[in-house]
Amino acid sequence: MISTRLPTPGRGPHPERPYAVGATVPHTPLRPIWCCRACGQPWPCATARLLLRAEYESNPIGLSIYLAGLMYEAMRDLYHLNPHDGPEPAALFDRFVAWGPRRSHPAR
Ligand SMILES: [Zn+2]
C-alpha cells in the first residue's frame, strides 16, 4: 500500500546556545513555552540574538541551520500546547529565522 503520509521527522537540535556568559543564567529557551529563561522574553530575545551572532560569527550557515531546527522544535511544542490557536507559521519564521544571517545573492 502506498501512503501519501510523510514520516514524522526526528528531533531538532538541543537549544543549548547561546552559552552562558560568566555565572549568569543563559539566554536559552525555556521549553515548552519558548520564552527566555533569563529575561522571560519570547526566545530568541534581543540578548540571545546578539550572543548567537557573536558565537556564529564565522559560521553563518551553522546559525541558520540551528535557528531553523529550533523553529521546528518550537512549532512542535507550541502547536502541541495550543493546537487550535497556536502562532502563525510566518510569525514563527520571523521570530526564529528571518533575523538571522542574510542570504547573499549570486553574482549576476
Ligand atoms: Zn533573554
Image: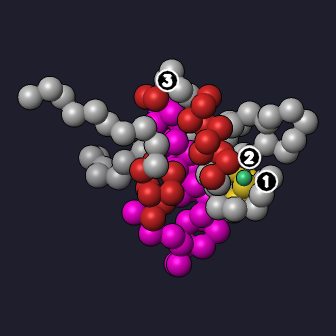
Magenta highlight range: 62-90
In the rendered image, which residue does mark 2 sit on? 27
Instruction: In the displayed orientation, state which residue is furthest to the right.
Output: 23
Spot occupied by residue 74 in the image (x, y as percentages of width and height): 58, 54
Q: Secondary structure at mark 3?
A: loop
Q: Is residue 47 above or below residue 107?
A: below
CB under 8 Å between discs 3 and 2: no
Graded by Cα atoms within 10 Å as few (under 14), some (14 to 19) or many (20 or more), the crowding at tag 2 reads: many
Which residue: 86% across, 32% down? 22
Spot occupied by residue 88 in the image (x, y as percentages of width and height): 44, 69
Instruction: In the displayed orientation, state which residue is furthest to the top.
Output: 58
Ligand 1 lies under 8 Å from the Cβ of mark 2: yes
Give amino acid for label 2: His
Which residue: 44% across, 56% down? 93
Graded by Cα atoms within 10 Å as few (under 14), some (14 to 19) or many (20 or more), the crowding at tag 3 reads: few
Q: Is residue 56 above or below residue 90?
A: above
Ligand 1 lies under 8 Å from the Cβ of mark 1: yes
Give amino acid for label 3: Asn
Task: Say which quarter of the image contains residue 83.
Answer: bottom right
Q: Secondary structure at mark 2?
A: loop
In the rendered image, which residue does mark 1 sit on? 37
Residue nearest the observer in this picture, 59 or 79 = 59
Q: Earlier in the sequence, mark 1 or mark 2?
A: 2
CB under 8 Å between discs 1 and 2: yes
Which residue: 56% across, 28% down? 56
Q: Is residue 86 above or below residue 99?
A: below
Magenta span contains residue 80: yes
Residue nearest the observer in this picture, 37 or 55 = 55
